[in-house]
Image (spheres, helix red, strand yellow):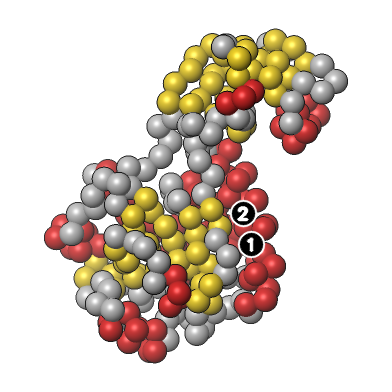
Amino acid sequence: MPHFFITKENVQNNTIVINDKENYRHIARALRARVGEKLLLIDENQMQYETVIKEITNNEIICEAENIYASKRDLEFDLYLAQSPLRSDSQLTIMEKATELGIRGVYPCITDNCAVKENVAKSKVEKWQKVMYEASKQCERAKVPTCFEVNSLENVLDLDFNRVIVFGERSTEQNLKQYLSKNPIKKGEKILVVIGPEGGFSKREFDFFKERNLPIISLGDLILKADTAVTVALGDMVYEYQG
């Protein structure tokens, strides 16, 4: 069932009027939806509406809600990612998969071994945000995660998080299961996961993490590409909490 974002002002009792140009064009023109077809809509209050199309005019789509309920497509803790941007399709994959895995936001960070120049990364933020928006629709996310402006790793680590977890390919002390068995994730906790570039974190950055007493977690003995490491790390975080 196609999934689209609306606002509460579009809803009048069980009738929902879709009249913004983007949704109208996508539903009526791209999908060529017809009267009687079903749409899944969600508003800013995370309420979902299972609807059926009743009428399509030249500028509006009128739907009737058959079922209304609170969205469950969310984590019980706030998961954020600080990550060194990759080139081209690899970064788009990260944005898509991070969205599917329930991330609240991504902080693109310029690191010592970053594969992308800072000015190039800054020019990509809008595109990365769009990918997260489209991925949110595809996986029925109630809230679209945020792609924050490009920043330094040091500045991001100064932000307000309950804890920061670094995943590294060397100088690791323990795996995630071992760490979380002693430090379980709490409901509502705000956690930042930090993952480096293809070349890994520099010695200076590892020393910086150690100065801050940040846990450095291993993803195992296999060598993973940076985009794979992001998917595995976030997936493991979600699994360990729900398991």
Q: Residue furthest bottom?
A: 204
Foreground residue among 60 and 32: 60
Please tell me in which quadrant of the rendered image residue 116 appears: bottom right
Question: In the image, residue 197 lies at what x, y percent?
Answer: 49, 75
Question: In the image, residue 195 lies at what x, y percent?
Answer: 42, 69
Question: In the image, residue 155 lies at what x, y percent?
Answer: 45, 74
Q: Are the residues at dot 1 and dot 2 in contact (C-beta closer than 8 Å)? A: yes
Q: Residue at x 70, y 10 (%)?
A: 54
Q: Residue at x 40, y 66 (%)?
A: 159
Foreground residue among 8 and 200: 8
Amino acid at the residue labelled 1: Val
At label 2, counting other C-alpha atoms closer than 10 Å, the crowd grade (few under 14, some 14-19, many 20 or more) is: many
Q: Secondary structure at mark 2?
A: helix
Q: Residue at x 60, y 30 (%)?
A: 7
Q: Secondary structure at mark 1?
A: helix
Question: In the image, residue 235 lies at what x, y percent?
Answer: 37, 53
- Regarding residue 6, the answer to whether it shows in the image is yes
The residue labelled by disc 2 is 129
The residue labelled by disc 1 is 125
Amino acid at the residue labelled 2: Gln
Q: Residue at x 48, y 32 (%)?
A: 46
